[in-house]
């Protein structure tokens, strides 16, 4: 199935295609106005969060409403470690001394945020990994609510529902793209690794997979941890994009947006996560402009609050009713290398076939 | 203490109305209906639209509107995904709930509206040294009647028996001549009626309306179902009362410092219960389990 001369490039092709897509869209946005650039930055940040969620949800087939918890942890961690010292003292006088003095560079803070999310994911894993299907959905939703209640009331650290302000909002397209490419690379590497194959096997048929010796809970934990790391980093980026953070920013609205992107794009493939992010971001921005009123091209519009939510929900609904697999329906966006042997016929297989053991993931980065 | 019990009984009755609406659909078609909250929200707004009419007429109209919405939901959205995986059903109901919210946002705006439906029901009377609101009496009484009515409907009518059969084994029931569309549509109808009545009581006790007001009740419904057991109606009602008791007691006896975290404790408790009993306290393992 794979190209014999460049097996890794061939199997990692979806990651390359996704990266190219991201680069093209970002490049186009760089030509646009400041608003367009901000929207594109938001899209890239959402991309990190969506790809992070995909790593667990897509590969395991277990629906999670709880991944925004990792985003929240990452967001608060980055906010608290990158805010100017003086501002932090003014806003959060009750902060423990070491945390008040801590001021990290953004990349360090983001990695730290990711690791902190991994710790939270370990607790998550203990609590929810026995569950599938609807029970998993409800349990993860319950955890999201619990964490949100804690964030909303922990005045000493999060400033409760007032939220934290004055976080440097200096994220640019150029600064975000590498992180999204990194997230795509991690997702691809995981997808091509042995645990990734095993987890997808358990997604297709848990009983058969278990009979073949797949320890589903262990493989789910691995995916959850990687997924939490990426989501934590995404949360850090998100807060640097927003510049202010209230508990409501990392709650149901964001959960919905992530799931919307995943499902419309196609929850069962990495390409789906990336395409969904781009598609929904563009659609949401168009709708936002319609909602705000004024002129969109030649058309004059009145403000219509609610239109965005209405159309986005309709998009999700129509996707579920008419094309339940999303835009990609589980396929990856690959490409054929010219030197390949035994060219594939029309219609690529739904997922990389598990016909040979994966290489060490380190070589897949594009 | 006795006062708290009365409060818990009243709150539990409201929760039970909500939980039964959610549980009915879950037991028949495996659907966790997020949009149930939006049915309640629609009911609230319908109360506002018809508030100039005499109360009895308003109440009937509200329930009729909500039932209509429930049936429309079934016909337009859920019928196409019937039999799909639980996740797909859940996401469909999620999308539907957002859609309805967006629609109400568009026509009614995001600002909270207030209404005073039950005027004199706000008063309370003294019973054996306890102050009990007339509204509490109404909620407890109406819920008791509805629970009894539902029990009678499910046991004594042909449609009810068909619904129970479908809840037991949908495929088998169809093979034996139960008409799927009829059973599912009537389940949505009953669910809608419960949502409409719950909406009246909810709005009567809070007095305010927002497009996002459906979230809290529907979460309460889920929690009650999980507590009681996924897929069992009476357990869901029981779960609702337990949840209400838990909420009222936590509110009354939690020390001041922890009090804001009450909801966190409740939901964390749910997760822990699910961890040990993935099918709820009274749930049947094997039904969904692989």
Image (cartoon, coloured by chain):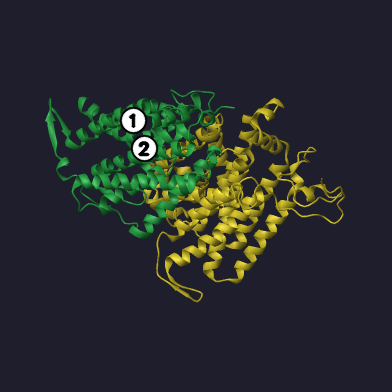
Chain colours: A yellow, B green
Q: Please say whether residue A65 is visible from this viewpoint.
A: no
In the rendered image, the vertical position of residue B54 relative to residue B285, given as above or below? below
Check whether the beta carbons of the residues at disc 2 and disc 1 lie within 8 A of each other: yes
Q: Earlier in the sequence, mark 2 or mark 1?
A: 1
Q: Is residue A106 left or right of residue A23?
A: left
Residue A151 coordinates in the image, percent (x, y) = 42, 43
Q: Residues within 10 Å of mark 1 (few under 14, many from 20)?
A: some
Q: Residue at x 26, y 40 (%)?
A: B201
Tag 2 and tag 1 share a subunit: yes
Q: Residue at x 71, y 45 (%)?
A: A350
Labelled disc at residue B135? none
In the rendered image, the vertical position of residue A240 relative to residue B201, given as above or below? below
Residue A170 coordinates in the image, percent (x, y) = 53, 61
Q: Is residue B43 left or right of residue A115?
A: left
Could you say which quadrant of the image residue A156 lies in?
top left
Q: Please say whether residue A232 is visible from this viewpoint.
A: yes
Labelled disc at residue B190? 2
Residue at the limit of the structure toward the front, as seen here: B177
Q: Residue at x 33, y 30 (%)?
A: B150
Question: Mark 1 highlights which residue?
Answer: B150
Could you say which quadrant of the image residue A207 lies in?
top right
* Count of numbered marks: 2
Identify the element where label 1 is drawn: helix
Identify the element where label 2 is drawn: helix
Q: Residues within 10 Å of mark 2 (few under 14, many from 20)?
A: many
Residue A105 coordinates in the image, percent (x, y) = 57, 53
Q: Residue under mark 2: which chain is it in?
A: B
Which quadrant of the figure contains the N terminus of chain A? top right
Q: Residue under mark 1: which chain is it in?
A: B
């Amino acid at each position: 199935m794979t190209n014999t001369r460049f097996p890794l490039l061939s199997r990692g092709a979806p990651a390359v295609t996704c990266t190219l897509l991201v680069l093209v869209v970002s490049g186009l946005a760089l030509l646009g106005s400041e608003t367009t650039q901000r929207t594109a930055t938001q899209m890239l940040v959402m991309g990190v969060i969506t790809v992070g969620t995909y790593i667990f949800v897509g590969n395991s087939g277990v629906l999670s409403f709880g991944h925004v918890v990792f985003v929240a942890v990452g967001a608060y961690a980055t906010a608290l470690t990158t805010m100017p010292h003086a501002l932090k003292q003014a806003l959060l006088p009750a902060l423990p001394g070491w945390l008040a003095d801590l001021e990290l560079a953004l990349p360090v803070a983001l990695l730290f945020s990711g690791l902190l999310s991994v710790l939270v994911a370990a607790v998550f894993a203990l609590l929810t990994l026995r569950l599938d299907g609807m029970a998993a959905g409800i349990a993860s939703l319950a955890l999201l609510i619990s964490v949100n209640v804690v964030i909303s009331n922990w005045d000493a650290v999060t400033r409760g529902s007032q939220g934290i302000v004055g976080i440097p909002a200096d994220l640019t397209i150029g600064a975000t793209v590498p992180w999204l490419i990194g997230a795509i690379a991690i997702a691809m590497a995981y997808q091509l690794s042995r645990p990734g194959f095993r987890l997808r096997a358990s997604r297709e048929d848990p009983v058969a997979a278990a009979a073949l010796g797949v320890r589903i809970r262990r493989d789910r934990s691995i995916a959850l941890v990687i997924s939490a790391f990426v989501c934590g980093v995404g949360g850090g980026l998100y807060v640097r994009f927003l510049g202010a953070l209230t508990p409501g920013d990392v709650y149901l609205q964001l959960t919905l947006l992530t799931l919307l992107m995943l499902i419309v794009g196609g929850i069962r493939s990495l390409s789906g996560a990336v395409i969904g992010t781009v598609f929904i971001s563009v659609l949401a921005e168009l709708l936002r402009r319609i909602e705000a009123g004024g002129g969109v091209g030649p058309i004059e519009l009145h403000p219509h609050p609610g239109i965005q939510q209405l159309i986005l929900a309709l998009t999700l609904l129509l996707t579920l009713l008419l094309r339940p697999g999303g835009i990609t329906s589980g396929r990856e966006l690959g490409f054929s290398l010219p030197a390949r042997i035994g060219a594939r016929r029309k219609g690529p297989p739904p997922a990389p076939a598990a016909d040979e053991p994966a290489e060490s993931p380190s070589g897949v980065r594009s | 203490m006795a006062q708290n019990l009365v409060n818990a009984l009243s709150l539990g009755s409201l929760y039970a109305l909500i939980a039964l609406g959610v549980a009915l659909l879950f037991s028949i078609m495996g659907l966790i209906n997020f949009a149930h909250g939006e049915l309640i929200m629609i009911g609230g707004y319908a109360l506002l639209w018809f508030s100039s009419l005499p109360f009895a007429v308003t109440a009937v109209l509200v329930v009729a509107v909500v039932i209509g919405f429930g049936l429309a939901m079934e016909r337009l959205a859920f019928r196409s995904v019937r039999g799909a995986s639980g996740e797909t059903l859940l996401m469909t109901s999620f999308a539907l709930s957002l859609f309805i919210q967006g629609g109400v946002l568009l026509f009614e705006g995001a600002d909270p509206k207030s209404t005073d439906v039950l005027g004199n029901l706000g008063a309370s009377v003294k019973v054996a040294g306890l102050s009990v609101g007339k509204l509490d009496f109404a909620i407890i009484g109406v819920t008791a009647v509805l629970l009894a009515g539902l029990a009678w409907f499910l046991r004594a009518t042909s449609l009810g028996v068909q619904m129970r059969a479908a809840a037991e084994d949908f495929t088998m029931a169809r093979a034996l001549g139960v008409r799927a569309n009829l059973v599912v549509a009537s389940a949505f109808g009953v669910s809608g009626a419960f949502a409409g009545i719950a909406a009246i009581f909810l709005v009567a006790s809070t007095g305010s309306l927002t497009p996002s007001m459906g979230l809290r009740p529907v979460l309460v419904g889920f929690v009650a179902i999980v507590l009681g057991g996924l897929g069992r109606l009476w357990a869901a009602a029981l779960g609702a009362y337990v949840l209400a008791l838990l909420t009222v007691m936590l509110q009354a006896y939690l020390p001041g410092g922890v009090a804001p975290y009450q909801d966190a404790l409740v939901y964390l408790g749910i997760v822990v219960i699910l961890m040990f009993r993935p099918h709820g306290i009274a749930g049947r393992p094997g039904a969904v389990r692989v």
